[in-house]
Image: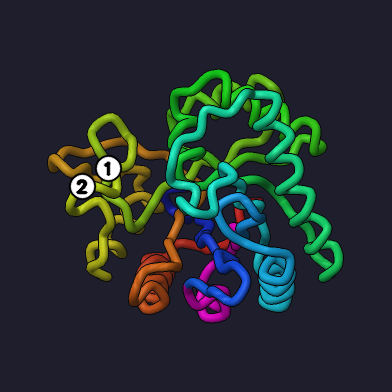
């Protein structure tokens, strides 16, 4: 990423409804982001929801990644599950495969894989589950991975020849070790549009973020995540996009 002409991907987790239950305003978010991480049956998403999300992403020219997760609809994928590596590999292949079929039916394609929630956090340190994810990516034709800087899965993926897109979070607080502050702690989710926009700009243009204790942390990222399920999420996302573009950051999909 050039300091003079930084390039950044804006991604959001979409398609997170299930049946008659919906979450977030996907249509509005697709007017802002460049990549849609579409839930594919683990923490959320059913066939109709997946297909509708793929159709909308295709209509907006937005790239698609498979937002894979532990099979935990009740917990929205935010609880660690001690799944055997071989079983986890197969679960992820099924989730990605389902989304690939829906994307193909709508004239588009899945360009990569982004783990969700507890699985995303676990891959920062869990060697066995990181290996299971890498095996799934290889079995799926070496699909690229979206992951956090410094995570164990990043090194393992690169060793396996898998392309990795490093991701930062515009609306989450960081701890000094580079991990996200647990959602159970006050201040873990940033809601002030100006604060979120400032953090987004710092990550996108400088590759740095201010941590919860006030210190600075290097955070080299190619993509920024904006959560679409919080109140005011769309207005916040638009504020971030406007601020980045005003600062000369070029927005385009990473994959």
Q: Quadrant of residue 187?
A: bottom left
Count of numbered tags = 2
> Please, is residue 66 above or below residue 235 in the view?
above
Residue 205 drawn in magenta: no
Q: Nearer the viewer, mark 2 or mark 1?
A: 2
In percent of width and height, residue 41 lies at 65, 55
In percent of width and height, residue 28 lies at 52, 80
- Residue position marked by numbered label 1 in the rendering: 181
The reply to whether the C-beta atoms of the residues labelled 2 and 1 are less than 8 Å apart is yes
Which circle marks residue 185 in the picture? Answer: 2
Which circle marks residue 161 in the picture? Answer: none
User: Who's the residue at 79% across and 55% down the image?
Assistant: 100
In percent of width and height, residue 40 lies at 66, 55
User: Who's the residue at 28% across and 56% down the image?
Assistant: 189
Asked whether, in this view, residue 9 is left or right of residue 188, the answer is: right
Asked whether, in this view, residue 190 is left or right of residue 67, the answer is: left
Q: CA distance from mark 2 to mark 1?
A: 7 Å
Magenta stretch bounds: 24-37
User: Who's the residue at 49% across and 39% down the image?
Assistant: 120
């Amino acid at each position: 990423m050039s300091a003079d002409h930084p390039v950044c991907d804006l991604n959001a987790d979409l398609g997170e409804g299930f049946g008659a239950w919906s979450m977030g305003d996907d249509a509005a978010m697709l007017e802002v982001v460049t990549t849609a991480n579409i839930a594919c049956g683990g923490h959320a998403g059913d066939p109709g929801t997946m297909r509708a999300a793929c159709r909308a992403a295709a209509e907006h020219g937005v790239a698609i990644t498979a937002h894979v997760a532990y099979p935990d609809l009740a917990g929205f994928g935010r609880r660690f599950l001690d799944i055997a590596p071989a079983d986890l590999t197969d679960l992820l292949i099924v989730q990605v495969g389902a989304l690939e079929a829906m994307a193909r039916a709508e004239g588009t394609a899945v360009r990569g894989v982004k783990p969700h929630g507890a699985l995303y956090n676990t891959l920062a340190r869990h060697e066995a589950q990181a290996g299971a994810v890498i095996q799934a990516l290889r079995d799926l034709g070496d699909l690229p991975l979206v992951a956090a800087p410094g995570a164990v899965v990043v090194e393992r993926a690169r060793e396996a020849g898998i392309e990795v897109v490093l991701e930062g979070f515009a609306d989450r607080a960081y701890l000094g070790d580079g991990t996200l502050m647990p959602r159970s702690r006050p201040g873990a989710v940033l809601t002030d549009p100006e604060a979120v926009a400032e953090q987004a700009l710092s990550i996108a243009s400088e590759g740095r973020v201010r941590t919860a204790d006030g210190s600075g942390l290097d955070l080299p990222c190619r993509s920024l995540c904006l959560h679409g399920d919080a109140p005011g999420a769309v207005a916040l996302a638009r504020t971030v996009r406007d601020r980045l573009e005003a600062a000369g950051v070029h927005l385009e999909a990473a994959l």
